Image (cartoon, coloured by chain):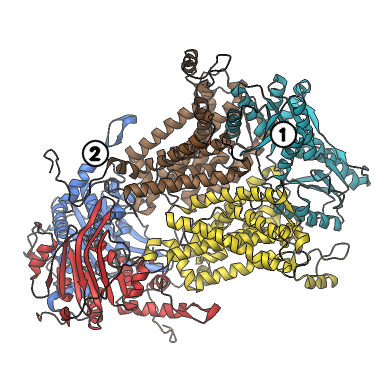
Chain colours: A cyan, B yellow, C red, D brown, E blue
């Protein structure tokens, strides 16, 4: 059996690397051949072409993330028309059924952002910056929007590149230029979360830092009390379960009856220490 | 010696075989690379890569890239760069999206407006470069950022906060101009072929390939026109001259500034064409469309033999360069390589294709 | 007028000058290349511009042909004050120039260089195209007339020999015809046969009423074709002499800027 | 005229004011841009930008970029590009990380090994360029992909599946070499200044700025050395010559190939230096380090007056170029502009800075 | 030997040649530039290489100075078979060349071009540095000796006049000394004063035992300094003559490749 995963996240992105690890593990466990593919940048046109390429190879199952239903819709529908079973992961829970996917494993970015916002607002935050290291990546933009909604207070989006030292400097600058900032939301733990922690430390201020996704160092910061929490989508599940379901479907025709929410799961100080090692291996 | 020869044979020239003559043309240099890459994938890739559907599949991104690459190649031959084409794709895509979705204009109006708009931005680029005498690299780099930023701002304004503008497909579906810029051409022919069992079909009986994606036709047409212009018109001569040595060209009476500004406008229009096609195909646009396409376009042009220093290159070279690039990028997904190794293979394939093509040319033409 | 050559020398003093340049100054940043030079060319004469290396000859003719804008000074073209914005303007007004650096594009073929900026076309409307065959033929023919047998019209100019390249530039300027033909050291890299062709060509176009400006360091070439001689030195005019009013030795002294020369007469017979 | 002048004044030269002479040097051209950007932010940005802490804050990324930019500038002056420096940062960062974390080597061994390793990759780059005669753009582009891909593969092998290698700080904290490559220098001085109230402190009494980040010192040192080499050594002359016209240089006896290969090695070593500094500072490395830094380095060099065609430019120009770039990128966060407009401002500021600097130079030197 | 010049002409026949080239062929792709040329240079002689435009003179001397690798043929340097991989090798062996295209970098200053590849240094170890002051002085001085008064040593070579630039290249080759000095049309852009200086310089270095290869299209210059004359035509040797064995008119005919020349004797006195 052959299963293809097409996502919008690159293999060298920390978050998607975990998904990919889940995909590979599930492939081994279920005994199917899986291939993970993604465009080189967040590029919906290229991604739809990759889906087309996958459909041409007529795999036994196709797993896709759907950050843009308009752009990817026709390609997914073509897969369905070709009789290839499709599962959507990560983003696109709202359109997954419509496009003919069997089910969705994942968590809505917007909802995750909202959950984070609410948690940070509960910690007393009133003014926040949302560090967006890939402006225009709709998935990340949604995280910020959800966060803004959940947080309720004043939120400024801080666009950066994904260079850690630039992010650190920019967060420092944002803190220095606005004394009121008491919350920093990072959209990726290793690229943005860690430098944000460093910047906050350098400023000597009491600022809550939270981040999407996990990284070992960021978890360490949580454990040390330098950061508030990390939002864990448990994306390993997105890769693992989807492939698992698909493998079982291919072998036995099995498929759960509804969407599977993989998160959100807030990793706070108590839990952080336990997952550091797992994170360092690319599982959490 | 031969009696019919009008001019006596020159003893200072060796006769050379036809193949050698061919390989000397910059137009055909990149072909060796295409063949090599083809052979590589014929061996390593899934057989479906070279079915009709597979070919259309890698030709589509190659065509989208190629339209940009041909524009970039002409501009490079003319001695300048345009780093803003990638952003221009996003920006003119936004403009086009707003035209059809927000303003509800028919394509008849929206498409010309988009082209005019893009050409104007190109003219601004060009005029700044000419007037200031700054390198085009830095000027168009500024526009890379500016246009990308404006796309973001514009999208948010148009959509009320989102970075994705949707609904283009609904707005354009029934327009009579749509078939020229979106979807597949020759649909009827392909259905007929499918009905007669000449091409593969899905279980449903629909052809696997519903037609030739229009971008491929645009791509081929553009490559032909650009080659014709370069090799067979005065304008082509002026482009080579302007890029070869702008002072010498100007001293010989070539209107260098006019040529360069026109080329900037042309490149911007190529970006607008790609924007229109991809936006209509995808039905949506977002702030990251065309990201780094300027880079890939320059890569394709250089693979195809354009010199970064200007004055040398060809549109057909850019054509083959884009196909090499598209074939490698999509082709790797037809092979069993782990995605982690994707970039390693991509880089290695590019290098080998170019080295090979270079080695072949040297061997054949006896250059040292 | 002397009778020492077989050339027809125009008696141009009565005609009005085609171009008249008055008190031209040209500065590059803090460098003064021309410090007030006046010069004119009449139809049917060959006016030689002579002078030491770095005297400003090339700078001066570049001002005349629209490459440089003068820092100060006036230009009259056919009696009207005028200045050219681009070399193309000058060309269209009827000034053809062979620059000292030849203004060739090394990577382009001989034919493409020959017709650069003034390509012959055939066909009409959208089908109007560069007539490559005619261009190739004309180009090979003109080069042959100048005494150069090219291997083919598609050789890149960058791979031509120095003299071949110079001949392309001269043949190009002559081919398109003009009211004024400016030649900046046209014979510097030419062989003896090609040189004599160029001198003969100058004579021919002059007899057709074209005004020729001829720059050379070779006293004998200048004397062979020149009607008037203007000598520049360190950016200034040393004066203008008519043919016959000056001996080769005097002229050579003026060209050397009045400075001593190394002694090596003998076989050079007075002039270098 | 003046009696003491040893050579008579030349009537063909106008005397020129000191300022004009200064502005003519490519080294100083970019300074006008720095001043303009400074004035802009002095007016629009929060006052904290130009406190000591603020300056250190924007100088740190500027320095990291600048180290790369100086390497890139020398290479550009020598007539070549290296697009692989960004990937090289990630790759040598990985190598360094593996040395200290996995192999537990002391810095004394790890740092030289990293440099040697980087230099070897640079030499491979350079030799391919020289031997094949292909444009360096395309060769190093291939290495951009290859090295980036290998970083990912290597990281996953080293960590057993993660894209982040951590533990570098723990492994290097107590090494005697660490202070030269990580953290802040002159900590004692700054504490003393803070204790005497000469610089801002936190409530705890610790200075707000604990010292000068070492990368800034490296940056300044490198700029000085590179300038010295360019202007005052035979090697500098060879670099200019190789980039100005490689055939003419080689015909005049300059060992062009040796010069170019050395420059590729130098650039790779600059990337390795940045990698070591940032990895030690961050305590970890990941697969995306240095992403697009090659691009920014070239931008900084061009802002600083390097010509893309080679043979002209300066290290000090790249120095100021990096500062302009760093100041604009970070500075905009100190202002009140809506951050959606960030890229628009970034582009506009770059353009204005370069145009201004160009206009000033022309005005002052009287060029046209 | 004739006594028609003030030059000291070496009687070089007895000495062994420094460089001997045998049956050199050079092809560029399908173009045959040299079809078998033999040539040698002895210490203390000036061997003139003459010929029509495109005859292959420049290609030949480039093969001699390590720029081109010959397609066929042998090169002996001081009796030993040898071939140079790079011009630097040739230079180190003692061959100094002034190329027809001068091999100058337009964007670099006069001094930097002058010393390119052989910079004078001062200081030791890490402090060993380009001695800019000495370099500037030497450069200005050498240019003055050649008859060019530069405005300053830091002017970019690209902004020099044609003759000034050529003088830099010549002065550079002469300054560093060598066993063989190759000059490819060194006087083409020079003024009369500079030309006489260059001819005098050739004479001087020859008398110091240097072998000189002199390419020119000017018969009179060649006769003034040459000891032997080799004529190339269409990539082949037409033959070698010693000084005194040949008249100017014969030489000129050979140089023109035996073809007819346009008629314009008169003031040119037999030779162009
Ligand atoms: N763009 C420029 N910038 C600075 N100086 C220049 C420039 N162009 C020319 N010059 C200087 O102006 C002077 C005149 O140069 P020009 O080329 O006109 O001399 P020329 O008379 O043609 O000499 P030649 O006989 O050697 O060709 C020279 O000393 C030269 O160095
Ligand atoms: N790189 C090259 N590629 C192709 N042809 C070349 C190349 N170099 C020279 N040639 C050809 O070889 C012939 C000899 O050229 P060369 O430069 O040696 O002539 P030359 O004797 O120096 O002439 P001139 O007196 O005009 O300088 C010319 O016809 C030229 O077109
Ligand atoms: Mg001149
Ligand atoms: Mg020659």
Q: Secondary structure at mark 1?
A: loop
In this rendering, position of residue A144 left or right of residue D14: right
Determine whether E192 is above or below E126 in the image. below
The verdict on label 1 being within 8 Å of ligand 2 is no
Q: Position of residue E203 (x, y in %)?
A: 13, 56
Question: In this picture, is A155 found above or below B14?
Answer: above
- Tell me where residue C170 appears, x and y as whole percent: 30, 72
Residues beneath discs 1 and 2 located on the same chain: no
Counting every numbered tag in the picture gives 2
Which part of the image, by quadrant, shows the N terminus of chain B? bottom left
Q: Helix, strand, or loop for circle 2?
A: helix
Q: Is residue A42 visible?
A: yes
Q: Which residue is mark 2?
A: E133
Residue D161, label in figure: 1
In the picture, which quadrant includes the C terminus of chain B?
bottom left
Residue pictured at 48% horizontal, 34% vertical: D42
How far apart are labels 1 and 2 at the CA level? Answer: 60 Å
Question: Percent position (x, y) of residue D199?
Answer: 48, 19
Q: Chain of mark 2?
A: E
Mark toward the viewer: 1 or 2: 2
């Amino acid at each position: 059996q052959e299963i293809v995963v097409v996502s919008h996240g690159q293999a060298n992105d920390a978050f998607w690397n975990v998904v990919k690890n889940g995909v590979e593990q599930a492939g081994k466990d279920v005994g199917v051949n899986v291939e993970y593919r993604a465009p080189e940048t967040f590029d919906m046109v290229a991604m739809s072409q990759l889906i087309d390429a996958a459909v041409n190879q007529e795999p036994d199952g196709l797993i896709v993330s759907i950050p843009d239903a308009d752009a990817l819709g026709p390609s997914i529908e073509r897969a369905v028309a070709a009789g290839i079973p499709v599962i959507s992961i990560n983003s696109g829970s709202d359109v997954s059924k419509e496009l003919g996917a069997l089910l969705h494993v994942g968590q809505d970015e917007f909802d995750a952002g909202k959950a984070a916002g609410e948690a940070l607002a509960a910690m007393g935050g009133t003014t926040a910056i949302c560090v967006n290291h890939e402006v225009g990546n709709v998935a990340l933009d949604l995280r910020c929007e959800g966060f803004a909604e959940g947080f309720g207070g004043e939120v400024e989006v801080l666009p950066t590149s994904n260079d850690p030292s630039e992010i650190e400097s920019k967060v420092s600058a944002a803190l220095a230029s606005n004394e009121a900032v008491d919350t920093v939301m990072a959209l990726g733990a290793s690229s943005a979360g860690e430098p944000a922690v460093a910047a906050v430390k350098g400023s000597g201020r009491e600022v809550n830092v939270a981040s999407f996704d996990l990284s070992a160092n960021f978890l360490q910061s949580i454990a040390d009390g330098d950061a508030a929490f990390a939002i864990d989508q448990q994306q390993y599940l997105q890769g693992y379960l989807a492939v698992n379901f698909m493998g079982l479907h291919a072998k036995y025709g099995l498929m759960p009856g509804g969407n599977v929410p993989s998160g959100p799961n807030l990793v706070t100080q108590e839990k952080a220490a336990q997952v550091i090692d797992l994170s360092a291996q690319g599982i959490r | 010696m031969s009696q019919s020869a009008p001019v006596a044979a020159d003893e200072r020239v060796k006769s050379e075989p036809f193949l050698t003559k061919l390989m000397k043309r910059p137009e055909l240099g990149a072909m060796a690379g295409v063949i090599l890459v083809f052979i590589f994938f014929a061996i390593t890739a899934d057989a479906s890569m070279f079915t009709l559907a597979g070919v259309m599949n890698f030709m589509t991104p190659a065509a989208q890239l190629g339209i940009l690459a041909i524009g970039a190649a002409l501009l490079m031959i003319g001695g300048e760069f345009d780093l803003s084409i990638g952003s221009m794709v996003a920006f003119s895509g936004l403009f086009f999206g707003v035209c059809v979705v927000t303003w509800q204009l028919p394509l008849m109006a929206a498409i010309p407006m988009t082209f005019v708009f893009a050409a104007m931005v190109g003219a601004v680029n060009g005029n700044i470069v000419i007037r200031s005498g700054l390198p085009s690299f830095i000027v168009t780099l500024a526009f890379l950022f500016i246009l990308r930023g404006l796309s973001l701002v514009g999208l948010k304004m148009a959509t009320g906060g989102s970075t994705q503008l949707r609904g283009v497909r609904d707005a354009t579906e029934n327009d009579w101009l749509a078939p020229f810029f979106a979807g597949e051409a020759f649909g009827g022919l392909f259905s007929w072929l499918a009905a007669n069992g000449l091409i593969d079909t899905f279980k449903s009986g629909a052809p696997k390939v519903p037609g030739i994606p229009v971008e491929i036709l645009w791509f081929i047409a553009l490559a032909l026109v650009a080659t014709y212009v370069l090799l067979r018109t005065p304008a082509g001569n002026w482009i080579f001259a302007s890029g070869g040595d702008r002072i010498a060209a100007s001293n010989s009476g070539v209107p260098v500034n006019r040529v360069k500004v026109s080329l900037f406008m042309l490149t911007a229009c190529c970006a607008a064409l790609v924007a229109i096609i991809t936006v209509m195909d995808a039905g949506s646009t977002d702030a990251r469309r065309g990201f780094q396409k300027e880079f890939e376009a320059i890569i394709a042009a250089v693979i195809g033999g354009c010199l970064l220093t200007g004055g040398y290159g060809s549109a057909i070279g850019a054509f083959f360069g884009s196909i090499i690039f598209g074939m490698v990028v999509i082709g790797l997904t037809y092979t069993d390589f782990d995605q982690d190794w994707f970039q390693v293979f991509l880089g290695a394939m590019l290098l080998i294709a170019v080295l090979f093509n270079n080695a072949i040319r040297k061997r054949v033409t006896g250059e040292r | 007028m002397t009778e020492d050559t077989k050339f027809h020398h125009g008696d141009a003093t009565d005609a009005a000058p085609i171009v008249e340049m008055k008190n031209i100054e040209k500065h590059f940043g803090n460098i003064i290349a021309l410090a007030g030079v006046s010069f004119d060319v009449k139809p049917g004469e060959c006016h030689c511009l002579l002078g030491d290396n770095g005297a400003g000859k090339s700078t001066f003719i570049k001002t005349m042909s629209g490459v440089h804008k003068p820092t100060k000074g006036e230009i009259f073209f056919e009696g009207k004050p005028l200045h050219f914005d681009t070399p193309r303007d000058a060309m269209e007004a009827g000034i053809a120039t062979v620059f000292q650096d030849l203004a060739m594009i090394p990577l382009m073929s001989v034919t493409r260089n020959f017709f650069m900026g003034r390509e012959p076309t055939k066909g009409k409307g959208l089908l109007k195209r560069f007539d490559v065959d005619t261009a190739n033929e004309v180009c090979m023919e003109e080069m042959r007339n100048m005494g150069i047998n090219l291997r083919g019209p598609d050789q890149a100019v960058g791979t031509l020999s120095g003299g071949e390249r110079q001949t392309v530039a001269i043949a190009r300027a002559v081919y398109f015809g003009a009211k004024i033909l400016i030649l900046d050291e046209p014979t510097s890299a030419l062989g003896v046969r090609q040189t004599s062709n160029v001198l003969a060509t100058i004579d021919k176009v002059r007899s057709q009423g074209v005004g020729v400006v001829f720059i050379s360091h070779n006293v004998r070439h200048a004397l062979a074709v020149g009607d008037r001689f203007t000598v520049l030195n360190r950016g200034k005019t040393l004066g203008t002499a008519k043919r016959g009013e000056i001996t080769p030795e005097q002229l050579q002294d003026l060209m050397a800027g009045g400075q001593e020369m190394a002694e090596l007469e003998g076989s050079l017979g007075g002039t270098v």
